[in-house]
Amino acid sequence: MSKVIISSLYDSPEFRMACRQFDQAADAISLPESIRDRTKHPRRCIAVSLPIRRDDGSVTLYEGYRVQHSLSTGPSKGGIRFAPDLCLGEVAALAMWMSWKCALVGLPYGGAKGGVSVAPAQLSRSELERLSRRYMQELIPFIGPDIDVPAPDIGTNEQIMGWMMDTYSNHIGHLIPSIVTGKPLSLGGSQGRREATGAGVAHLVCRYLTDVLKTPPEHATIAIQGFGNVGSEAALALVQNCGAKVIALSDERGGILNPRGIDVARALAYHRYQGTLAGFEGAEPISNDALLTLPCTVLIPAAVQRVITPEIAAKLRCRLLAEAANGPTTYSADKVLEQRDDIEVIPDLLCNAGGVIVSYFEWLQNRANEYWDRDTVLTKLFAQLDRAKDAVEAQKRKFKFSRRLAAQTLGIERVAHAKQARGLFP
Ligand SMILES: NC(=O)c1ccc[n+]([C@@H]2O[C@H](COP(=O)([O-])OP(=O)(O)OC[C@H]3O[C@@H](n4cnc5c(N)ncnc54)[C@H](O)[C@@H]3O)[C@@H](O)[C@H]2O)c1
């Protein structure tokens, strides 16, 4: 019997949610008590203070975090989030989900996540560069291409990964591209990485529409919350590759709706120029909450976690919920969804795994110093997603689990087996 000392270190709604999911999955597969606590709890966390000189000469102190949840199956892997109100517990939950996701899709990685509590839009470019470099500088003793490999997430992008890689490489004394993924192409980034998460979401949506809902993608209407890297690339791929109709889009300032279909390429150009979708011609305004409960074939939350509450879950009018964001559905909302046989769910662990899969490809290319073309990357990506989808469907059928529980149990079981095989040291 193992004994865990419960601390309040990570306490947050996200961490409690991840722990409840873990407990449910561990019970469902009768995971031995002796392995549960060390599979569940993060291996280590780092919290750093980041004093940054502002352009006006003043100094602001930011807090940064990195949580390495599991290192049993390889280096840990996960994004860096720049967001106001980010806390250690949110990062720990996201790191836990990364462990299960990497295991589910068969990557030789553990899970990690990091970030800084900051509103990046309120910093100038040079302030953002100083913050990104200082954050990486503080992490240098704890990360490395064989230890922990960051990537972009909410509020970070290719340029920030480039600054971080440069900071690490300057410290080592020569170029180390494999220290981060999601870099600019000119610095060893991979073809297809920028669109990987969104294109993977679109690929799975088309597969589920065809295989499960028996609906041709060209007949599907799509609503997407979040128009950043993931939401915008998913929208483009759904229109361009699948012929679907995107009827609603949103960002944190609000959304736009056009039941006849939104010109996504134009919306993207407008968003790049204006920094928001608000005011886009050819569509009417819609609130984020109204978007979630819009009648549509596919709803794609692609912004932040915990937006689908039990109240919203009861009011959803989509037929397929494709979770591009991490943790968009609360634990209690999931119980509501389990009672609704009119909605199929592609759970986050599977749905948004395209990003980490192509990050793995980028890391492999950097280490081999050999670069693949876009078609090769996307073909390998879709094949790996299809294998993971088939495994989830088989687990779902075999144990009569929900699709979410099938994905979670597969991921958690693989991490636990690796820990058991390695044994307990000392
Ligand atoms: N970037 C990746 O490769 C990747 C991979 C897997 C999962 N994800 C997940 O996808 C989600 C989006 O990540 P991203 O990289 O696209 O981030 P991003 O910063 O590029 O975009 C986030 C988008 O969400 C919007 N948003 C933020 N808060 C919102 C709110 N409260 N309501 C509505 N919209 C809001 C923003 O305006 C923006 O349009 C996150 O949950 C992230 O963890 C990202």
Image: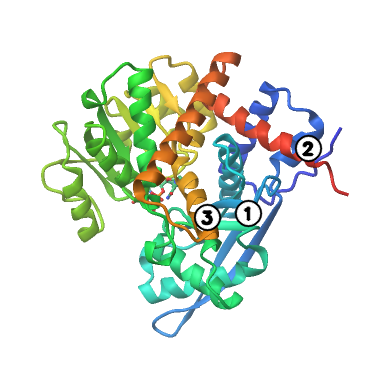
Q: Nearer the viewer, mark 2 or mark 1?
A: 2
CA separation in Å, label 3 and label 2: 26 Å
> Which quarter of the picture shows residue 386?
top left
> Which quarter of the picture shows residue 274?
bottom left
* Residue 61 screen position, x and y as percent: 53, 73
Mark drawn on residue 421: 2
Tell me the residue at 41%/52% (across/down).
Answer: 372
Q: Determine the residue located farthest toward the bottom in the rendered image.
A: 57
First of labels 2, 1 by sequence position: 1
CA separation in Å, label 2 and label 1: 23 Å
Q: Secondary structure at mark 3?
A: helix
Q: Secondary structure at mark 1?
A: strand
The residue under label 3 is: 363
Under 8 Å from ligand 1: the CB of mark 2? no
First of labels 3, 2 by sequence position: 3
* Protein image colouring: rainbow
Tell me: residue 175, above or below residue 376. Answer: below
Q: Residues within 10 Å of mark 1 (few under 14, many from 20)?
A: many
* Residue 202 screen position, x and y as percent: 34, 35
Given the image, on which type of amino acid does mark 3 rest?
Answer: Trp
Tell me the residue at 66%/34% (across/down).
Answer: 414
* Residue 345 screen position, x and y as percent: 43, 25
Viewer can see residue 79: no
Q: Nearer the viewer, mark 3 or mark 1?
A: 3
The residue under label 1 is: 67
Q: Residues within 10 Å of mark 3 (few under 14, many from 20)?
A: many
Given the image, on which type of amino acid does mark 2 rest?
Answer: Ala
